[in-house]
Amino acid sequence: MKAVEYRIENISEFLDVFRKNPPELFRGQAEDWPLIPSLGRVTLSVFEGILEIEEDIISEFKKYGYPYFDGASLSYTDWILYAQHHGLPTRLLDFTSNPLKALYFAVEDSTNLNDGVVWGFDSICGYEFPDLMLDTVKFFYPIHVDPRITAQESCFACFPIGRYQLDVPSIETYDTRDTRPFDRVVIPGEFKLRIKSELSTLGIHKLSIYPGVEGVVARVKEKLEL
């Protein structure tokens, strides 16, 4: 079943989309990019496949990051989770269980006048990192390694990666109950600033999404339009 598409101009219209039959998970994007993890956007270059890239990333991250974590007790999947959190390319794609926070990610850069998108997925989200020997995408709630994961009400989609796989298909191509989009909400670029302001009045802004000193600084800049 193809996702139902809506266009909205304010928060009230956005909430009306999900009022009767809300999906479980949401993903907001500043533009209508393919739903693939960051690892799938890395240029292969000298690598034989996507899995080799992941293994090299985690190996280097462990080598240099070990002193900053309790490395002895971390599994390979723990390292993937920390790598994702700190901005390294991984097989994980971020989702949230909160529709308004997904909407914030879609309008966060209000200077980007391309249409934003919020996807809704009626997916089952587990509570453990799935086995990496996957044949389809699996969703899971991560351990809260950082306050941002809590603040953003995060869930991740874990993609299967084969040894010599050369690309990562978009999530919809897996065509399972969990990976079929439920709803697709388009936010016209000219309404991003207005919606971002509405979200701020509801307490959804830089500081609530990114707790910590960095979030404080970002919130000051956001509020004073610096």
Image: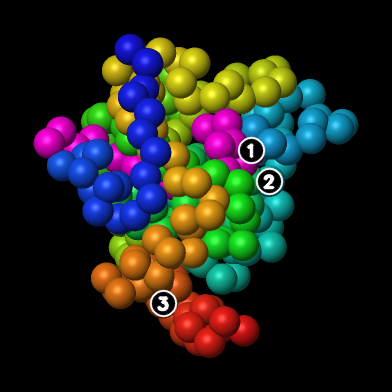
Q: Position of residue 120 (x, y in %)?
A: 33, 35
Main secondary structure type of the part rendered in magenta: loop
Region rendered in magenta? 20-39
Q: Is residue 129 left or right of residue 190?
A: left
Categorize mark 3 by other alpha carbons within 10 Å: few (<14), some (14-19), many (20+).
Answer: some
Q: Position of residue 100 (x, y in %)?
A: 31, 55
**Answer yes or no: do the residues labelled 3 and 1 have beta carbons within 8 Å?**
no
Residue at the spot x=61%, y=53% of the render? 113
Q: Position of residue 157 (x, y in %)?
A: 42, 36
Q: Earlier in the sequence, mark 3 or mark 2?
A: 2
- According to the picture, the residue beneath numbered tag 1 turns out to be 39
Number of marks? 3
Q: Residue 135 has which mark? A: none
- According to the picture, the residue beneath numbered tag 3 turns out to be 207
- For marks 3 and 1, give the one nearer the viewer: 3
The front one of 85 and 197 is: 197
**Answer yes or no: do the residues labelled 1 and 2 have beta carbons within 8 Å?**
yes
Residue at the spot x=30%, y=40% of the render? 25
Magenta stretch: includes residue 22: yes
> Can you say whether 38 is above or below 168 in the image?
below
Q: Amino acid at mark 3?
A: Leu
Residue at the spot x=45%, y=34% of the render? 158
Q: Is residue 95 left or right of residue 63?
A: left
- According to the picture, the residue beneath numbered tag 2 turns out to be 57
**Answer yes or no: do the residues labelled 3 and 2 have beta carbons within 8 Å?**
no
Residue at the spot x=86%, y=32% of the render? 45
Categorize mark 2 by other alpha carbons within 10 Å: few (<14), some (14-19), many (20+).
Answer: some
Element type at mark 1:
helix
